[in-house]
Amino acid sequence: MSTETASTTHEDRGFLDRLLASPFLSDLLSNRLAILGLSLILLITLMGVLTRLAVFVGVLDFGTILDTQFAQPRKHPPCGSPTITGWLGSLGSCQHPFGTDAQRRDVFLRTMYGAWLALKYGTVTVAASTVLGVGLGTLAVYYGGWLDNVVMRTMDVLLSFPSLLLALAVVAIFGTGLWKAVIALTLVYTPRFARVVRGAALKVLEDEYVDATVALGARDWRVIVRHVLPNSLAPITVQSTLNFGLAVIDLAALSFLGFGATAGTPSWGWMLTKGVNNGLLNGLWWMSFFPGLFLALTVLGFNLLGDGMRDALDPRMQDAVD
């Protein structure tokens, strides 16, 4: 019994050691831009999650984020109006670090909650499109023939349309709302995953061990789940990371155009359109600046992390850099 326990512990340690010593992880951690992107993602995720938890446990009243606050100053600048004036300049209180909007709502709280909404709906969009795209692409390449032609030609038709234009058309059919925008963007991103996984699965199916597994009588689902999908995870992971940034910015774009978030929702896209209409042209820059800043940082973080993962997984990219 002790021998088995020691053997299991040794195997576990060996697996952890191999994971920590893997070329992918070491290359990724040595990429400063990838680490910067990961840090931005973790920081914005922490802010969004903490704000959502504060609302959930009752520390923060959700009404202060959604409803007009008549007790607050109208269009309050960041950190308040000057209260002390001297040779050091004007000092003010930071009751509203990002100021207030035209409805007297705190822009800081709305921006932080907007991070939660962006990550929440972005995660659902990427997860749904990944599952659909990977499933369709894997089945198409494994069975081939007419199924491959039907699936991939359908994906080609969807890819022939500009992504935002296709999303707008789908939202116009199903109606406005963030969940409708998620459905539209899932349809837009699915062909990208289908093409990526098809190319990766084609290489896997050409290997001799797959032919040997089929010759030994393995069922189709076992070959797909145990061999094709695990060996196609690298490009799928990179594509998912890059598409997460695209999903966040496309969701904001649909909300900015009036097809995503409804009125009052603390979505970054909706805050941008209200800030541009009510404040930017009048010098009230903070109403659109801070939501736009966090949107840009989120997309930048996912792009930097995705590029770093792609460089770490592709030896040709490493040779090109060296």
Image (cartoon, rainbow, N blue to C red):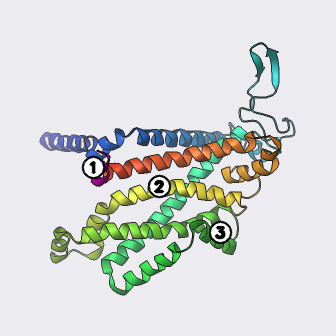
Kindly tell me whether residue 74 is visible in this rendering: yes
Which numbered marker is on residue 319? 1
Left or right: residue 186 versus residue 72 is left
Number of numbered labels in the structure image? 3
Which numbered marker is on residue 82? none
Residue 239: x percent and y percent? Answer: 43, 59
Quarter containing the C terminus: top left
Name the secondary structure under disc 3.
helix
CB-based contact (under 8 Å), mark 2 and mark 3: no
**Identity of the residue drawn at 30% across and 61% down:** 230
* Res 195 quadrant in image: bottom left
Q: Is residue 85 above or below residue 270?
A: above
* Res 29 quadrant in image: top left
In the image, is residue 316 part of the stretch drawn in magenta? yes
Left or right: residue 186 versus residue 29 is right
Give the magenta range.
315-322
Left or right: residue 309 versus residue 303 is left
Residue 286: x percent and y percent? Answer: 73, 39
Q: Is residue 85 above or below residue 35?
A: above
The answer for how far apart the CA atoms under marks 2 and 3 are is: 21 Å
Residue 82: x percent and y percent? Answer: 81, 23
CB-based contact (under 8 Å), mark 2 and mark 1: no
Which numbered marker is on residue 168? 3
* Mark 1 nearby-residue class (10 Å; few <14, some 14–19, many ≥20): few
Please state which amino acid type lies under the numbered disc 2.
Leu
Name the mark nearer the viewer: 2 or 1.
1
* Mark 2 nearby-residue class (10 Å; few <14, some 14–19, many ≥20): many
* Res 32 quadrant in image: top left
Please state which amino acid type lies under the numbered disc 3.
Leu
Residue 183: x percent and y percent? Answer: 59, 67
In the image, is residue 18 part of the stretch drawn in magenta? no
Name the secondary structure under disc 2.
helix
